C-alpha cells in the first residue's frame, strides 16, 4: 500500500476501514451473490442498507423524529434551486447570508424563483470574514436553511434550530453522487403541487428517497461511514479531534509569520485551512514539493490562490503532523 | 465465488471483468495513492477517465463530432423535466409517443412546461404493443428525442437521426447514479438563459459535465464498461449476442403454450423479456424456486405482474440457458 495524504477539498479522503469493507464485498455482498453495484434498489438488501444508514445517522446526530432524511442527487448546486423552488412562497422573500462564492451561487438561483434580501455578506472583504450576528438584517421567525457540505457531522449540530440542512456528500459523508437533506416535516407542505416531480422535497420524502433509482453505491458507502463515525466516538469525539487537527495546523501557520492565514482569525474554518506563502512562486514550489512528498491536493481554489488543506473527519491526525513537519522544513530551506 | 444470475431490470448485472478491475484498485488507483472514491474531479487522473470514457463511447457508437456527451444526475426521471425545460420553446408544442408508464411520466412533466400532443399511445392496449409508424400523428420536422435507458448500446444506433438521446446508466452502462445524454450541438442554443443552472444542458455542455462535482465513481465504472464493450466486439457483436439471447428465451416461451409472452410478438423487447404462467400462484412459485436455484430478480414489475427477465449487455448467455433449463423443468413438474 502506498496511500498518500489527500488534502483535497472534495471529493476527499474516506476512512481506510470503509474503503477496505467496500473493496472486500465489491464482487459479492455476503449472502446475496451480487455486487452492491448490481442489486435492485427495491431489494431487501438495499432496504436494510438505506434504513441502516438513516438509523445510524439519527443516533449519531440526535436527529429528532419530526425530521425526514432524504438521499438526493445533483449536489449542493441543485439544492441552490430546490430550496427556493420548494420553500420560497409565492410573493414572499428569503434572507440570504453570503459568506463565499457558493452563497453567491445560491442567491443567483433563488432570484429565479422569488425575492431575495441579502441579510449579510462579506463580499467587500473577499469573504475573509463572516458577518457578525448583530449585523445581520434578518426577517423575524423565518425557517433556517443551512448548506453544511463542508462541516456536516464534523462536530455536534443543533438540528432542531434548522428547518433544512443539506450537504453534498463528497467531503464528510461519502463519495460524490449523493446529496443529503435533513428536513423538518412541516416544510414538506410548502412544496408546490405544480413543481417538477424530481425537484419536490415532498415527493422524495413520500417515497423514502426511492421515487426513482437512488445512487445505491454512494448511499452504501455513506452507511459504512455512519458506522465508522459511531464506532469512533460520534460527533463529540469527532469535534474534539477536528479541533486538535485545526489547532495544530493554525499553530504552525501563526508560528513565525512566514505563512499567513487567509481567513480572519475569528472566521477560521476547522475543515478548510487556507494560507499563503511570501510569494506566488514559493506557493507553486510548495505545492509541487508537497505532492512529491505524499501530501497531495494542497493547491488552493483557482479563485483564491494560495494553499488549502482540507482536513475533514476522515483525514488522519498523522497527515496534519506530516504537513506541519513539511511546512517547517520548507520554511527552513526557503525562508 | 458464489455469484448468481441477476435478471434485475436495473440496477442490473455488470461485466465481471469490470467489477474485478474496480475492486482491484478500490484502495488505490495505480500511481495515484488514492481511491477512485477520493480523487478530485479536477485532477488529471479523473480528466483522463472522463475523456477516455467519452472517446471510447464515440468510437463504439460512431457518435458524430457535432454531438456533445453529457454525464448528468437524477436518472431518466429528471430528464422527463429537463427535456421540455430546455427544448420546448415558449408557445410551442411537443409530440410524445407513449409506450409505457415511463412515457406517461414524461408527458406529465412536459405538461408543466408547455403544450403536449400525443402522437401515438398504446395505453388502451395496456402497452402490450407499440404504435405503428404510419399511425403516428407527427408534427413535421421536429427534433427526435429518445429515452434509451433500456437499450442503449445493446446494438448499433443511428445517432444522427436523434437530436437528443438520454439514458439512466443502471441498465446497460454503469451502476445507478449517472445519467448519459448525447445531444446535438444546435439543441444547446435552445436552453433558456432563465433556466436554473443545474437544469440547463447548455451549462453542462459548456463545463464538460463539471459545472459541479460529477458522480466520479459511476463515470469511472462506465469508462470500464465502454472498454469492455469495445473489447467484446462493439455494438454489432453485442446486437448479435443480444438477439441470440432473446431468441433463445422467446423460443422457450413459445414452445408449448405453458408460458405466454406478455407483449405482442411484434413489440417484443430484446432487453426485458416478460411472460406469464398459467396462474398467479404458479408465478409466485416460479419466482421463489428460481431465486433458490440462483436465478434472481425475475419477479415482474408490480404494475404488470408475471415474470420479467432483463438480459442487458452484461447478462451472460449461460444465464439465459440456465433459465431455459429451469423453465423446462418447472413446466414438467408443474404442467
Image (spheres, coloured by chain):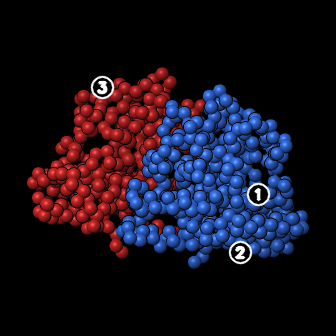
Chain colours: A red, B blue
Quadrant in which the N terminus of chain B appears = bottom right
- Picture quadrant where residue B172 is located: bottom right
Please name the residue that numbered disc 1 is placed on: B269
- Give the residue furthest to the bottom: B1
Q: Which of pointers 2 and 1 lies earlier in the amino acid sequence?
A: 1
Q: Position of residue A269 (x, y in %)?
A: 26, 47
Residue under numbered circle 2: B318
Using residue B181 as the reference point, say whether residue A222 is left or right of it: left
Residue B235 appears anywhere in the view = yes
**Circle 3 sits on which residue?**
A137
Foreground: disc 1 or disc 3:
1
Which residue is at the far front? B65
Residue at image location 68% in from the left, 47% down from the top: B162
Q: Nearer the viewer, residue A253 or B135?
A: B135
Q: Quadrant of residue B242?
A: bottom right
The structure residue drawn at horizontal position 66% and vertical position 70%, both measured from the top left corner, is B233
Q: Chain of mark 2?
A: B
Depth check, mark 2 against mark 3: the one in front is 2
Q: Is residue A141 left or right of residue B155?
A: left
- Please name the residue shown 26% across and 59% down the image: A287
Give SS at disc 3: loop
Please tell me the numbered disc located at residue A47: none
Subunit that carries the residue with mark 1: B
Amino acid at each position: 500500500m502506498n496511500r498518500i495524504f489527500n488534502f483535497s477539498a472534495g471529493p476527499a479522503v474516506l476512512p481506510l476501514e470503509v474503503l477496505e469493507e467496500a473493496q472486500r464485498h465489491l464482487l459479492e455482498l455476503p449472502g446475496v451473490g451480487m455486487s452492491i453495484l448490481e442489486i435492485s434498489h427495491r431489494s431487501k438488501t438495499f432496504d436494510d442498507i438505506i434504513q441502516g444508514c438513516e438509523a445510524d445517522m439519527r443516533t449519531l446526530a440526535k436527529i429528532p423524529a419530526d425530521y425526514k432524511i432524504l438521499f438526493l442527487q445533483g449536489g449542493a448546486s441543485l439544492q441552490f434551486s430546490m430550496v427556493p423552488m420548494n420553500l420560497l412562497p409565492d410573493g414572499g422573500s428569503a434572507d440570504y447570508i453570503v459568506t463565499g462564492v457558493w452563497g453567491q451561487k445560491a442567491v443567483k438561483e433563488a432570484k429565479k424563483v422569488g425575492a431575495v434580501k441579502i441579510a449579510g455578506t462579506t463580499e467587500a472583504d473577499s469573504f475573509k470574514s463572516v458577518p457578525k450576528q448583530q449585523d445581520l438584517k434578518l426577517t423575524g421567525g423565518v425557517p433556517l436553511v443551512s448548506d453544511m457540505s463542508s462541516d456536516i457531522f464534523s462536530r455536534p449540530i443543533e438540528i432542531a434550530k434548522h428547518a433544512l440542512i443539506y450537504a453534498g456528500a463528497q467531503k464528510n459523508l461519502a463519495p460524490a453522487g449523493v446529496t443529503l437533506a435533513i428536513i423538518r416535516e412541516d416544510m414538506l407542505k410548502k412544496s408546490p403541487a405544480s413543481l417538477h416531480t424530481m425537484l419536490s422535497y415532498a415527493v422524495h420524502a413520500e417515497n423514502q428517497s426511492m421515487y426513482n433509482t437512488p445512487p445505491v453505491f454512494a448511499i452504501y458507502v455513506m452507511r459504512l461511514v455512519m458506522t465508522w463515525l459511531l464506532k469512533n466516538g460520534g460527533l463529540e469525539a469527532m469535534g474534539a479531534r477536528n479541533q486538535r487537527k485545526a489547532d495544530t495546523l493554525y499553530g504552525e501557520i501563526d508560528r513565525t509569520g512566514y505563512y499567513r492565514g487567509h481567513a480572519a482569525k475569528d472566521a477560521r474554518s476547522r475543515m478548510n485551512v487556507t494560507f499563503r506563502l511570501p510569494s506566488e512562486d514559493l506557493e507553486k514550489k510548495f505545492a509541487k514539493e508537497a505532492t512529491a512528498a505524499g501530501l497531495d491536493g494542497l493547491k488552493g481554489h483557482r479563485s483564491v490562490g494560495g494553499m488549502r488543506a482540507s482536513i475533514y473527519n476522515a483525514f488522519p491526525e498523522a497527515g496534519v503532523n506530516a504537513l506541519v513537519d513539511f511546512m517547517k522544513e520548507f520554511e527552513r530551506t526557503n525562508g
